[in-house]
Amino acid sequence: MSDRRRPVPAPPAEEDFLAHAFDSGSDTAVISEPGEPVDTALMPPTGPAVAREWVAPDYRTHTTLADRFAAALPSTLRRTLEAVGGLYSMFAASLYGLGADLIRRKFQFTEFVERSWFLVSVALLPAILVSIPLGVAIALQVGALAAQIGATSFVGAADAIGVLREASPIVTALLLAGVGGSAVCAELGARTIREEIDAMIVLGLNPLRRLVAPLMVAGVLVAAFLNFVVIFVSIGSAYIFDLAALHGTKGSFFGSFTQFATVADFVTSEIKAAVFGLVAMMIAAYQGLNAKRGPTGVGEAVNQSVVVTGIALFAMNLVITEIFFAVVPQRTF
């Protein structure tokens, strides 16, 4: 029986392969697929931004326009957008898990009570100590100005506008983020670098349902409670200072206060505090669960959580205040 095997073609010489892969007329390498002409091959990027044509051959069908756009962004902006997307995904998954656990009666009530008590215990005394000089400072500044124009009875109105509408939710959220949020971020970061979170996932336990969902509820309720404490202590300290130092009267203080303050102002202040508390706890949990590089990374995560929370709170306060002015009609005198 005759051997009719096909002759195996000899491999191309080394110089032929190099001549095919590299253009002698330029310094740029040309990468082509088998059977693809050299003139239609993909060229590597020539600048810091990824060129539109430069896609790895194995992943051409899996690359979308959004991927190319993200790759073309500066690294800082890209990391910021990835963090915002990750925070949103964590919030959505935690909210879904919270609803499912409440329906199935599997909510981690013990974790919620422990988180709430911890946040109250570490933030209540600082909130009281900050509220006293806050109310006194507003009463002093407004009282000095009102004495010059002969309107000392409007100290209560200044407290109604300054403390009730704006100052108390911001002070509450900053205290909750700086005292409670930093501790929560450090705890979750320590669990992350010790691989306790990975161990929970291996055991089939969802860390978002077990840890983040109770923290969300605790942050909302504790922030609303602390906001009420800040309002009460600030207005009380301003009232005492107005009577003792500015020689005001009880009737003028409470008359102007009730004239400018409404139930809608108090409700809006509580809503602001609840939203700010939720945002502060979510940012702290996200930074803690994404801590890297050991103890140094945990410290950086705590620092970033406090700074990012402060920036986000002032931006959200502006948006909620504008919505409040658009929805609730203001009094005219």
Image (tube, helix red, strand yellow):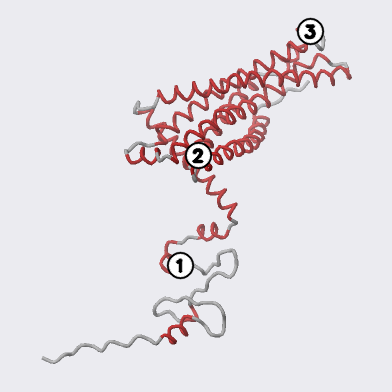
Does residue 182 lie above or below 221 as drawn?
below
Quadrant of the drawing holding the N terminus: bottom left
Given this view, does label 3 or label 1 mark the residue nearer the observer?
A: 1
Given this view, does label 3 or label 2 mark the residue nearer the observer?
A: 2
**Where is mark 1, residue-wise?**
56
Q: Is 94 in front, or is 137? A: 137
Q: Amino acid at mark 2?
A: Tyr
- Specify the farthest residue to the front: 295
Q: Point out residue 46 in the picture as x, y percentages from the top left corner.
A: 58, 70
Q: Amino acid at mark 1?
A: Ala
Q: Secondary structure at mark 3?
A: loop
Does the CB distance between marks 3 and 2 fall below 8 Å?
no
Labels 3 and 2: the sequence-earlier one: 3
Labels 1 and 2: the sequence-earlier one: 1
Q: CA distance from mark 1 to mark 2?
A: 32 Å
Q: CA distance from mark 3 to mark 2?
A: 50 Å
Q: Residues within 10 Å of mark 2 (few under 14, many from 20)?
A: many
Q: Is 25 in front, or is 238? A: 25
**Where is mark 3, residue-wise?**
249
Report the number of numbered marks: 3
Q: Quadrant of residue 246?
A: top right
Q: Residues within 10 Å of mark 3 (few under 14, many from 20)?
A: some
Q: Secondary structure at mark 2?
A: helix
Q: Residues within 10 Å of mark 1 (few under 14, many from 20)?
A: few
Q: Point out residue 309 in the picture as x, y percentages from the top left corner.
A: 60, 36
Question: Mark on residue 286?
Answer: 2
Residue at figure coordinates x 51%, y 34% from the top left: 186
Q: Secondary structure at mark 1?
A: loop
